[in-house]
Amino acid sequence: MARQSSRLIRTTLCWLVLLTFAAGCSQAAPLGVTTPAPTATPAAAPIASATPAPTATPVATPAPTATPVATPAPSATPAPSATPAPTATPVATPAPSATPVELLPKGDAPERIPLPRDPLALHRAFRDAAPIAPIATAVVDIGAGEQFWLRDPAETTPRRITAILRYRGPIVALYVDATSSVDQGALERAGQQFEQEIYPRIRAIFGAEQRPSGATDRITVLNTNLRGAGGYFSPQDWLPAEIDRFSNQRAMFVIGINSYPIGSEGYLATLAHEFVHMIDFSNHRRRAGWLSEGLAMLGEERLGFLQPGAEARYFAGPPVQLTSWSTDAGAVSAHYAASRLFVRYVDHQYLRQRGLDPLMQADAAPEAVLGRLTGRCCDDARAFADLVADWGVANLLDDPTIDEGRYAYPGLERTAVPLAPDSAGARADAAPFAPQYHGPWGGGMLEFRGATSVALGPPARDTTPIWWSQRDDQSTSTLTVPLALGDAPELRFATWYEFEPGYDYGFVSLSTDGGARWVTLASEITTSDDPHGQNYGAGVTGASGGWRDVRVDLGQYAGRQVLLRFWAVTDAALNGAGWFIGDVRLDGRSITAGWQPQGFVATTLDQPQRWTLRVIRRQAAATRVEPVDVAADGTARVSIADDETVVLMVMASTPGTTRSAPYWLAGTPAR
């Protein structure tokens, strides 16, 4: 990935958000509300514990999973650490398989689930196990200046700026870049509108936020010029500077006032958007970027900030994957629109009556949580695919009279247009979870043939099986094995990797004390560069460009009993295909037994390709929607009566990949 385009996109995702669109939030409708009564939820108190699990009901003072404090209090139900102890039962490397093996849903086995990224645990494992001093925040007078780290996505590394405290209310403190001139009255009105309208209403919908322990009791908003984004929230700012040297050590977000002037509707919408991200991060430390963005935009819409043209951005170009955002800067607006429309659909169909707790509090993978909302009887992956398919049909029909309103939701200004079939049929490529439409087809038979397997990422390799870190945001996957080293030990392994460069890293490490402390091992694929404070030593980042055979000299540990561990550690927003590791050898001997995975899974390089098809039948004034079964060989047939026409919706639905899959259609176009 190009650093600039990648960083621009990662800023529009998850915690770092809101690229300026040509038709952006500046065109939003005003709030149009009176000052509401205070919410029943009190202001959040300082965090009291480092790693307790999220509570089932939003409260003001739960502790976040990843925010470290100096003396963490024990939790009744502690969340797993990012440096787990070895599992009780090591597993052997599974026997090779020539047939693609489908990964089971993550929930079936706890060791398959990547852990939330825990900066405190990582700091103690790799850097310093000494206690961390609590964050100490000085009282700042109105008109005084403070230094802030600015993470402008258009720049290669954070930089310092000076900002002046210009407004301090009971909830928010507004700082303005010392080089910027703003209207004081507009600033004060914006601060009051956030405190009196946006803050209580967003909390009433999404729950309470948390604050870093010891930090200022007000939310900080830094107003400055941004070249690469309209605004952002960074969870790194919650950390003590000992853990992240670029941290501002407070709950805050940044608004680009060159994109959204203070007091404008776009500015207020951005405040609402970023505040939703802050609450979401408080409750869910492994939220997928695409879903986090959808929730933040739902917050805008619930307050009356509507962004015209979302459908146009989604339907105008090639279909984009809902469940992963690409590194193509030109596709960012389409990804934004997809997330906005999908979450709006889910909200209308399933959440308006029951509230957002099922999404805000659930700690499972988003596909599992969303699939369970439907209450359908199949596995989570299939239920999620069916939900996305329902949304896809709604984007085509937007008709509340069919199937009790399943295929409609509010706010659609336009609908999808099917691709007219050619007399010779059609051949197309389908990105995962990106519905496509073909039709109308006429009387006779419509035949579908799709690929039966899809790559997870790497090209074919003789070494099988392969350990894979999986792809996730804000996660830690580990793969550990105990070793007895000889006189001149040497480690070798084959690898293919795709990490977001400079933000996501892999590490090869050794521990000589049973796993309390770890030392990263340098090799030809590692770097010590650390532009964003995410590299814990000798790290692997970026893309391998193909399979690499790696050699690591372990001579300084000769004769010792050690633990060898591979780590894959990701931050928020973007992720790549992950880390694939195989043919691990010590002194020429293959290591096949004793592996202790947490988040890593043994797999083939291909997965069975899943397809989700819907046929929309039109006959006189009636419209029916039916699922279409796809056989194991990737084929399906749809019979068409003489007096009807059909449109076929096609969606590739294999989880865990971003690779497109080909398919072919053959039939008779409608006259």
Image: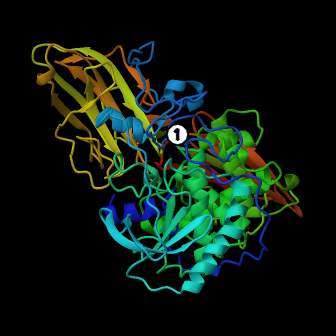
- The spot of residue 144 in percent (x, y) is 42, 74
Residue in the image at 35% along x and 71% along y: 161
Whether residue 634 appears in this view of the structure is: yes
Q: Is residue 565 left or right of residue 375?
A: left
Position of 516 relative to 114 (above/below): above
The quarter of the picture where residue 320 lies is bottom right
| Coordinates of residue 668 in the picture (x, y in percent) | 68, 58
Residue 231, position as x, y percentages in the image: 49, 69
Left or right: where 185 falls relative to 563: right
Using the image as rendered, state which of residue 99 and residue 249 is in the foreground. 249
Instruction: Give the image's coloring scheme.
Output: rainbow
The front one of 570 and 242 is 242
Q: From where the camera sits, is residue 440 visible?
A: no
Q: Element at badge 1?
A: loop
Residue type, numbered disc 1: Thr
Q: Residue at x 69, y 38 (%)?
A: 56
User: In the figure, residue 670 lies in which quadrant?
Assistant: bottom right
The vertical placement of 128 against 510, above or below, is below
- Badge 1 crowding class, 10 Å Cα cut-off, few under 14, some 14 to 19, many 20 or more, is many
Q: Quadrant of residue 27?
A: bottom right
How far across and down, in percent of the image, does residue 15 sit?
51, 57
Indicate the quadrant containing the N terminus: top left, top right, bottom left or bottom right.
Answer: bottom left
Q: Quadrant of the C terminus?
A: bottom right
Image mark count: 1
Say above or below: 334 vs 516: below
Pointer 1 residue: 65
